[in-house]
Amino acid sequence: MTNGFTTGFFISAGLLVAIGAQNTFVIRQGMKREFVFTVSATCFICDFILMCIGVLGVGKIINDNITLINILTMLGVLFLLWYGVRSLKSAYYGESLLISGGDTAKTTILKIIITTISFSLLNPNVWIDTVAIVGGVSSTIDASQKINYLAGALSASFLWFFSIGYLAAWLSQIFTRPLFWRVIDFLIGCYMIYMSWSLFHFLIK
């Protein structure tokens, strides 16, 4: 039991630690202290669905569908480009200077959930990590250990998203200068545009 759980936990944790668009969004929302629980929970639920798909064997069907992967990648390119431009606009106009209460009035919980799902499901890297790799490794695990393996992978996901979300929220109390938030939005905007270009480059190769 322990072996399957441990394997799943460390495989998942190793993939989650890599900084990506999804993690960056969770950290940003944490630093703004805006819907931290909702964002973290939504990321975990998306991982839950995708990892279950991968471990239960459905992942191979998706991985073999090149057309579907290309569509997801293109949607990811457009979404990350849009979000990157939006972040640069926020940095220029200083729209996220107020950590709480500033743009919360303009951001509903539904918008946050949709944005979080977009970062999760329109990001090919998330599919590769959860469905292809976590699901692929599960094929080498004894059938009696698969549930434990899945539980370990999901435990790592749960701990990761809630940890980075609330750690970022705690750290945000230290950084209160308006310039800091403009720099954060600028860096996130540049990173999202870079990720968009990287996905587009991958698509046309």
Image (cartoon, rainbow, N blue to C red):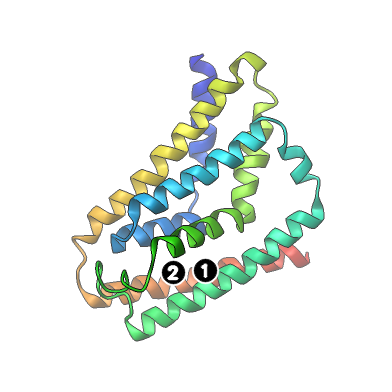
The image shows residue 28 at horizontal and vertical percentages of 37, 62
Whether residues under marks 2 and 1 lie with C-beta atoms below 8 angstroms apart, the answer is yes
Disc 2 designates what residue? 188
Q: Residues within 10 Å of mark 2 (few under 14, many from 20)?
A: many
The residue under the point 81% across, 53% down is 66
- Residue 91 falls in image quadrant: bottom left
Q: Is residue 170 visible?
A: yes
The residue under the point 52% across, 32% down is 153
The residue under the point 61% across, 58% down is 122
Q: Is residue 68 left or right of residue 168?
A: right
Could you tell me how many numbered marks the image carries? 2
Q: Residues within 10 Å of mark 1 (few under 14, many from 20)?
A: many
* Residue placed most toward the observer, 44 or 136: 44
The image shows residue 9 at horizontal and vertical percentages of 49, 30
Q: Amino acid at mark 1?
A: Met
Disc 1 designates what residue? 192
- Residue 186 falls in image quadrant: bottom left
Identify whether 29 is placed above or below 158. Answer: below
Q: Amino acid at mark 2?
A: Ile
Q: Residue furthest bottom?
A: 93
Spatial distance from mark 2 to mark 1, Cα to Cα?
6 Å
The image shows residue 62 at horizontal and vertical percentages of 75, 45
Q: Is residue 20 visible?
A: no
Q: Which mark, by number, is residue 85?
A: none
Disc 1 is placed on an element classified as helix
